Image (cartoon, helix red, strand yellow):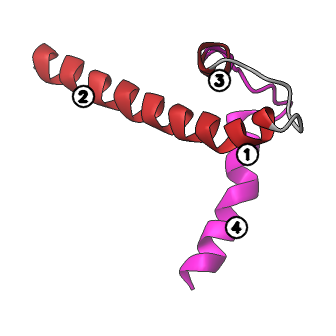
Amino acid sequence: MQEFKNLFEYALEKEADNSIWDMWLSKYPYMEIGQLEPQSYKEFSNELKTFKPKTILTNEQIEAELLPMIEAERR
């Protein structure tokens, strides 16, 4: 079971790395022409991987806001 968990975590990590790479590639042309500040892929990746969103809402408050929208969508 632990082996499966490790494999699954590895797959998730690789999927995240691929998404980060695609995001960086989409920014690259703008870095080349000077519209965005140049940033290495490694810097960009580390920035995203260590990003912790700051929220003033608790999980319960977020759920309370989203549940009515989800219920309305189901109708």
Q: Could you tell me the amino acid type at mark 2?
A: Phe
Residue located 78% across and 33% down the image: 31
Q: Could you tell me the amino acid type at mark 4?
A: Pro
The label on residue 48 is 3
Q: Give the SS element for disc 3.
A: helix
Q: Which is in the foreground here, disc 1 or disc 2?
A: 2
> Residue furthest toward the bottom?
75
Q: Which is in the foreground here, disc 4 or disc 2?
A: 2
Q: Could you tell me the amino acid type at mark 1?
A: Ile
Residue 40 percent location from the top left of the image: 67, 17
Identify the residue position indicated by label 4 in the image.
Answer: 68
Residue 65 magenta-highlighted: yes
Q: Give the SS element for disc 4.
A: helix
> Residue furthest toward the front?
33
Gap between marks 1 and 2 measured at Cα: 28 Å
**Magenta stretch in the rendered image:** 46-75
Q: Which is in the foreground here, disc 4 or disc 3?
A: 3
Say whether disc 4 or disc 2 marks the residue closer to the N-terminus: 2
